[in-house]
Image (cartoon, coloured by chain):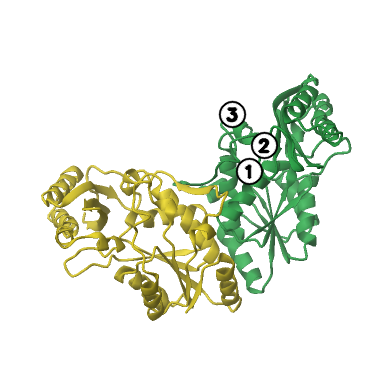
Chain colours: A yellow, B green
Amino acid sequence: MQIFDKIADMRAYLAEARARGERIGFVPTMGFLHKGHLALIRSAREDPEVDRVVVSIFVNPLQFGPREDYRTYPRDLKRDEELCRSGGTDALFIPPVEEMYPEGFATYVEVTGITELLCGRSRPGHFRGVATVVAKLFNIVQPDCAYFGIKDAQQVVVIRRMVADLNFPVKVKVHPTVREEDGLAVSSRNVYLGPEERQAATVLYRSLKLAGEAIARGERDAARLKQFIEETITAEPLARLDYAEVVSWPDLKPIESLQPGEVLLAVAAYFGRARLIDNLLVEVKA
Amino acid sequence: MQIFDKIADMRAYLAEARARGERIGFVPTMGFLHKGHLALIRSAREDPEVDRVVVSIFVNPLQFGPREDYRTYPRDLKRDEELCRSGGTDALFIPPVEEMYPEGFATYVEVTGITELLCGRSRPGHFRGVATVVAKLFNIVQPDCAYFGIKDAQQVVVIRRMVADLNFPVKVKVHPTVREEDGLAVSSRNVYLGPEERQAATVLYRSLKLAGEAIARGERDAARLKQFIEETITAEPLARLDYAEVVSWPDLKPIESLQPGEVLLAVAAYFGRARLIDNLLVEVKA
């Protein structure tokens, strides 16, 4: 596995691979890798449309709000390198912040509409930061395929929208959420959780599953489902609810009554200083 | 010369060229081609770094304000095709609006700061439209080199900023302004001018040249230069001044006193319904 911290060196490596006709699979991450990331790397490694696997590790300051956890976001580069290597990564890109945002940086990619609700409402500017850094990474790596986890469902929608709208020649591939045995979605931020918070955090997925079961039993009223998820989460004393929403998929519009097709149940809550998100895509039967 | 109106067909043609190791030169235009465009096409054709020349013609609605001339912008596709062919264009890309902005389009590229003055102040949203469409075209064509005229000096700065900030793997090449014999910068919008307005419009370049001469004689006060250009233009009864500015190059910042290096003199004025722009880059001696 080769490691690059300069854009020019990463490009030179990739230009050679491309000149040999190799196709690039790309997994952008913020590091502190977990089972979810490893599943994405494995998807890329096993993808018949991919010859070479590139992983990036970059904690992107642009997607953190001023009161958020940019400075304290967990980092462990040594361990990440080892995990990438054993996962079959060919090239690891770890640019420093000055390499990505040199002085005078002034350009932003804005995906409008779908970024205004869910996490976009709680974290203004977050998806602008995400879209901008992913546009940059796509232009640096020029991947044929890029891999994202559906755990960040709104991020997936935003990136797909950006790729379609700006005509990035990249195939976006989406991987199911990886969970711990008790259902908690794996996340780098789970490291923030104390033992009791860790236990309490299982309420997120539990609330989603219970709502999914209610839909299976015939519930079609979005407001009642939302209230049901909210009540399940707020019943947990260590949880502080940020939002619970029932929205259309994949356009993330508020809905009143569930129609046949797919619907997204999405939640965010704080457990101590950890803000965790989770979601469930539910098939609504006719 | 091959002509494409679908993104997928344009891409397929280019993928084949790239697979043969050919390098792409790209001239994006809004059509109604003139000597300035032809100079850009010739630059691409004669560029030793380019094997294949692609020209696009797309009148981009996103860069026109609601009261601007999008509907009436001059179009003559038959003539443009002939000019492209005789200029040595290999492929002409003429997408319809629905191909570039299908329903649901929601992503914009914003270059901040340098877009807030000069034409950016008179035409809010204009450079957002320019940056967005150029990002799209760059992702569709994936050129090695792209060619722009310095007549749109602020556009050049915006595109260079975007290319640097979003890491587009494109070399931006800039061509000098092409002028009529009497100094008027060639522009598709010159067709709007009646004979008297056409004569009056020469005041733009004249005012810039006179200011350039004043700088050569030692004038270093930006406010006096600006006033001098304004007075020269407003002395022409058929001219309605939009702005005259003296700004630093290439960061387009307001300046008080000219320092050694380059300075941009930039003007915009209406002649009848034609809004024309012009500029002069002046070397300031120590």
- For mark 2, name the chain: B
Q: Earlier in the sequence, mark 2 or mark 3?
A: 3
Q: Secondary structure at mark 2?
A: loop
Look at the image and tell me whether residue A43 can be seen: no
Taking the image as shown, residue B193 lies to the left or right of residue A228, namely: right
Q: Quadrant of the C terminus of chain A?
A: bottom left
What amino acid is found at the position of numbered circle 3 in the picture?
Answer: Arg
- Residue identified by numbered label 2: B73
- Relative to the observer, which residue lies in front, A150 or A268? A268
- Residue identified by numbered label 3: B67
Judge whether B269 appears above or below A135 on screen: above
What amino acid is found at the position of numbered circle 1 in the picture?
Answer: Val
What amino acid is found at the position of numbered circle 2 in the picture?
Answer: Tyr
Residue A3 in the image, given as x and y percentages of width and height: 49, 74
- Residue identified by numbered label 1: B59
- The span from disc 1 to disc 2 (Cα, nearest Å) is 8 Å
- Relative to the observer, which residue lies in front, A185 or A216? A185
Give the class, few, some or many, for how many residues have Cα within 10 Å of label 2's Cα (few <14, many ≥20).
some
- For mark 1, name the chain: B
- The span from disc 2 to disc 3 (Cα, nearest Å) is 12 Å
Measuring 15% from the left and 57% from the top, which residue is drawn there?
Answer: A203
Give the class, few, some or many, for how many residues have Cα within 10 Å of label 1's Cα (few <14, many ≥20).
many
* Disc 3 and disc 1 on one polypeptide chain: yes
* Disc 1 and disc 2 on one polypeptide chain: yes
Judge whether B272 appears above or below B1 on screen: above
Residue A86 in the image, given as x and y percentages of width and height: 38, 80
2 or 3: mark nearer the eye: 3
